[in-house]
Image (spheres, helix red, strand yellow):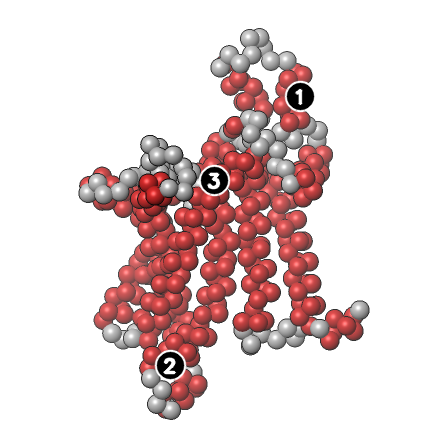
Amino acid sequence: MRGWLYHHPYVNYAIQRVLLFFVTLWGALTLAFFFFRLIPGDPISAYVASLESSGAYGTQVGQEIIDHYKEAFGLQGNLFQQYVRYLQQVLISHDLGPALMNFPTPAQVLIVRALPWTVGLLGLSVIFSWCVGVVIGGLVAWRRNSRGSQFITNLAVTFSNVPNYFIALFLVFIFAYRLDWLPPTAAYDPHYDPGWNLDFIMSVIQHGTLPAASLVFIFLCRDTLSTRMLTVTTLGEDYLTYADAKGLPQRQILTQYALRNCILPQVTAVAIQLGFIFNGAVILERVFNYPGLGNLLIQAIGQLDYNTIQGIITFSIVGVLTANLIIDLMLPFIDPRIKVGQ
């Protein structure tokens, strides 16, 4: 077997990456479980107290009812027993348990409802800003001594580290309250029924323009700077000088020689960014009251809803690790400079 793997280095490489994926996944899920279990507070007592105050129970809640809720939410027994039960539910049964914030609805139902909004908002923003940022970054690096390139570079440096919620508040103030062009909150107009109809789709686009613009602006600045930095480092290479000496057009030298080598690290970066979309844009979604994973995570933390919190964290961990695994498996094919097994 060892000799066969030696003569098939890519298979050996892929097996190592997949094993590393599962080990990292187990470690990340374990850390997330114990971290949230160590947060002070008793979510069951708070939930039962809210039921008592709302009149759901006519008399004081007994210990049997409390034990029933603890068992339903996976909080029965010591910490190790809860951990074993959690791994069984997530890895074997694929069940996150009921959501405390909307009992008895399963936590995965709430996550699946919020997931399309986050994926649509962040996914499209990341892809669009990456495509435009690579083009602008390459042109800025190629014409780095011109005034326009210097202005764009300074603008990108200035706004690349600005929090996206600050840009969001600025856009809301201008386009929602001053000009009254776009709605400031929500994902769609509640007067429309969700579905694949033109009115609802146009409402979703209208409501998603401001949060998407907030993300695109920041991502665009960062992608522009990273592409410019990678392109500038290649401009003095011998193969570019040789291509120029052959009399090739400048556009061809930029696209087929300079950007072609710079695009590979950017592919890795955009894959990792796409993996992080399962985190949700937490503060941004809260600012716009957008029904994505970030907004759901804040609500779940406020109520110590362990199942929903860990479900969102699990989606995020799996998304990031899967994105890294896919890139690791693809790199030997898209980058000939990588020698598998060496």
Q: Which residue is mark 2?
A: 253
Q: Secondary structure at mark 1?
A: helix
Determine crowd level at label 3: few under 14, some 14-19, many 20+ residues with C-alpha closer than 10 A: some
Q: Nearer the viewer, mark 1 or mark 2?
A: 2
Furthest-bottom residue in this view: 246
Q: Which residue is mark 1?
A: 67
Query: What amino acid does circle 1 point to?
Result: Asp
> Mark 2 or mark 3: which comes first in sequence?
3
Q: Can residue 308 be seen from the camera position used here?
A: no
Query: What amino acid does circle 2 point to?
Result: Ile
> Mark 1 or mark 3: which comes first in sequence?
1
Residue 108 % position (x, y): 56, 37
Q: Is the N terminus in the top left, top right, bottom left or bottom right quadrant?
A: bottom right
- Residue 114's tag is 3
How far apart marks 1 and 3 lie (CA) works out to 30 Å
Compared to residue 26, the image places residue 240 above or below, namely below
